Image (cartoon, rainbow, N blue to C red):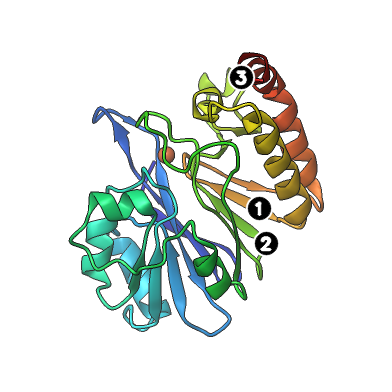
Amino acid sequence: MSETIEQLAEGFWRITGEVRIGGVVDIGTQCSLVRLASGNFVFLDSYTLPATVRQQVDPLTEGGEKIEAILNLHPFHTLHCEWMHSAYPDAALYGTARHIAKFPDLPWQDTRCEEVALHESYNEDFAFSVPRGVPLVCDDESVHFSSVLALHRASGTLHVDDTLVYLEKGFPLSMLPMTGRLDFHPTLAKALQQRADAADDFRQWAIDLGIDWAGTKRIAAAHNAVLELDEEAFPLLIGEALGRVKPVLDKHRAEFG
Ligand SMILES: [Fe+2]
């Protein structure tokens, strides 16, 4: 996957990047640049922008001066936080509890990305959602299920890392059942909290997400593709994804119910 910037909608640009597992297989990553109603900009997530991408970001943002904040939304996507801050030191730096713990020397804002106070301060431009029934940061560091999902209201673009997965892969990976469809991240079973109501809480969160964000027009998913949606398709796709994890939720209920 190459490092590119693509305008997905009015006021919304997605930057695709590279992440190599074990230095070999590139699973891709993303960050997004969004123009606010005020005319200022924010980054959703961090990425070390190559010169070719920066050449496009700079004229949009008056050389970066109009970038007011960097919102790091996935607790385990941390590789590029330091670079992003060094490139845009005047942008207010926000992260989740894990970002702050991992880089205590960076000048983080007091409000964390998972907190309602942050969501309210950007309410004009974004809706945010944090999954229920799962912790935002799992003790098992290999479980990257949860994140803060962000819906850019003006363009109907949903920026999501890991929690929702949409893959488009060439042959032969295109033969796998999980390519070309929207699913929850495969670590759901490990992520669910070990309590009786966790499966029900997760299910209700997903249903609410489908209803509340029914107008979503496209989904930018970190690893690796953008899914353009038909009108009102989002609740159906969430319902189908929920149907496919029913065995996971049933098993959890049987174990902890
Ligand atoms: Fe990820």
Of callouts 2 and 1, which one flags the residue occurring earlier in the amino acid sequence? Answer: 2
Q: Which mark is residue 256?
A: 3
Q: Ligand 1 is located in which of the four quadrants?
A: top left
How far apart are the two marked residues, 2 and 1, measured between alpha carbons?
Answer: 7 Å
Q: Position of residue 52 (x, y in %)?
A: 31, 62
The residue under label 2 is 156
The residue under label 1 is 218
Q: What amino acid type should be assigned to the residue bearing mark 1?
A: Arg
> Horizontally, is 92 left or right of 184 in the view?
left
Dot 2: element = loop
Q: Which mark is residue 137?
A: none
Dot 3: element = helix
Classify 10 Å Cα crowding around label 3: few (below 14), some (14-19), many (20 and above): few
> Horizontally, is 80 left or right of 29 in the view?
left
Placement of 184 over or under 42, stated as above or below: above
Res. 122 in view: no
